[in-house]
Amino acid sequence: MDKSAAATPPMRLFDGAATAAGKHTPATPPQGYRSNMSTAARKSENPFVDFIKTYRHDPVLFVKKVFGVEPDEWQAQFLRAIADSERRVSVRSGHGVGKSTAASWAMLWYLLTRYPVKVVVTAPTSSQLFDALFAEIKRWVKEMPPALSELLEVKSDRIELRPSPTEAFISARTSRAEQPEALQGIHSDNVMLVADEASGVPEAVFEAAAGSMSGHNAVTILLGNPVRSTGYFYETHNRLRDEWFTLHVNCEKSQRVSKEFVREMAIKYGEESNAYRVRVLGEFPLSDDDTMIPFSVVEQAMSRDIEVDQYAPMIYGIDVARFGSDKSALAKKKGNVITDIKKWRGMDLMQLVGAIKAEYDAEEFEDRPTSIYVDSIGLGSGVVDRLRELGLPAVGINVSESPAMKNAYVNLRSELWGKMKHWLEQRGCAIPKDDDLMSDLCAPRYGFNSSGRLRVETKDEMKKRGLASPDMADACILTLAGDAAVGIYGSASGSTWTKPLKRLLKGVV
């Protein structure tokens, strides 16, 4: 959890005269509050009412005194907006700026300064909900003074006020299109709905929740990385922006985000890329910038005259045809140069294995590949098995498996395409000048899922757009499958991709 160096010492609960009386008389707290108070607290005629008067309209003071931390400027602005009766608040940002922290503060402040009160927090997936935001709320409960934290019962999917668990609680509910009714029926004098990773929350869920959020004391908070230029979250920052209080948080200006992360993202994706816009700038992606590898990057790599390192190992990457119109392709990479690409159409498994064996045998002994990476999905698994029987160093790669950089990519295929883009952008590499290869490399589009992880479109999705399978490009990316980078937020200690994907290299000795 984030704590500022300029933090205020935590409050002594109910330890003095209350100030900043609220604009409205607070509701009488339920029976049981006083039984949970310390002896010192009981010296006040009604210390909990004093507590509410002090903090009901000042969540920033609540955060400073209860948690002993100093909110960032945007976090304070966010909290004050809710206190100033903004009923609809939408926050878009890059990664790591403290969204979950600010939302946790807001929910706990709302729960403890109103009665009756129901807070519902949601996210597109259970992992996003329980491993991220709800876990953050629980951590901040532990940071409360005992006199407050002991009032709360923390469960796996709820945080309840012990004296009145049915009338005052925070409930975690996954937002799924097939069950939009999960957010219906939230009725109370005070209601708060918090949607994390809001770009991924289905429209049906927002429609289902609309009835519950129509009251005067209902607050809706949307937070997330702006991964889609469509949908309700996008509209709150555009067409509906006059109806919402909106905030935009840029990682470049955030004190919580390291300069190293920003620099690595700029190097990895480019400052003009959609990836940088979403993950760093907190901006929605541009609809016309959805090609994974730009034409200019491929063109430059094809134009370079790079001397081949004769002492570097030879690596083969093989993409096996899935359909009759597809080609099987073999890419040869030596050092930082893809030296040659072979293409075959209409071959069965044994014929393809024979063609690969012939290429292997034709190499000078010192140039024979040390690794042959084969896409093992479908017919590829049979190719791997037969090549191994022949004594070739074949390695099956299932590109649908989890990536090494789990915070950055949806699957290994997307990770390898990201690595290919990064590799091509380096001036010390070169690829053959081939129009078909150019088309293959520039064809796939990419986007982001609700977690902000990059996803390259599948071959089937490309076929639906009328495009051929990028067989030659897929063979090229497989030559990079032997190494990967691992780090926080999808970054690495460096961007050299030097750590082996050992869990994927089955059968290698």
Image (cartoon, rainbow, N blue to C red):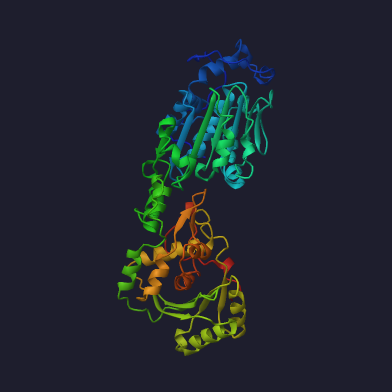
| Up/down of 39 relative to 166, above or below | above
Determine which quarter of the picture holds residue 382.
bottom right
Look at the image and tell me whether residue 420 can be seen: yes
x and y percentages locating residue 337 in the rendered image: 38, 75
Residue occupying the point 52% across, 27% down = 10
Camera-side residue of 267 and 38: 267
* Quarter the C terminus occupies: bottom right
Determine which quarter of the picture holds residue 392.
bottom right
> For the image shown, how many numbered marks are present on the structure?
0
Camera-side residue of 300 and 406: 300
Please indicate whether residue 316 sits to the left or right of residue 339 in the image: right
Look at the image and tell me whether residue 72 can be seen: no
| Up/down of 55 relative to 483, above or below | above
Please indicate whether residue 298 sits to the left or right of residue 208 in the image: left
x and y percentages locating residue 385 in the rendered image: 62, 79
| Up/down of 285 relative to 337, above or below | above
Determine which quarter of the picture holds residue 421.
bottom left
Report the residue that reaches farthest toward the top.
Answer: 45
x and y percentages locating residue 358 in the rendered image: 51, 88
| Up/down of 26 relative to 219, above or below | above
x and y percentages locating residue 497 in the rendered image: 45, 64
Residue occupying the point 48% across, 86% down = 359
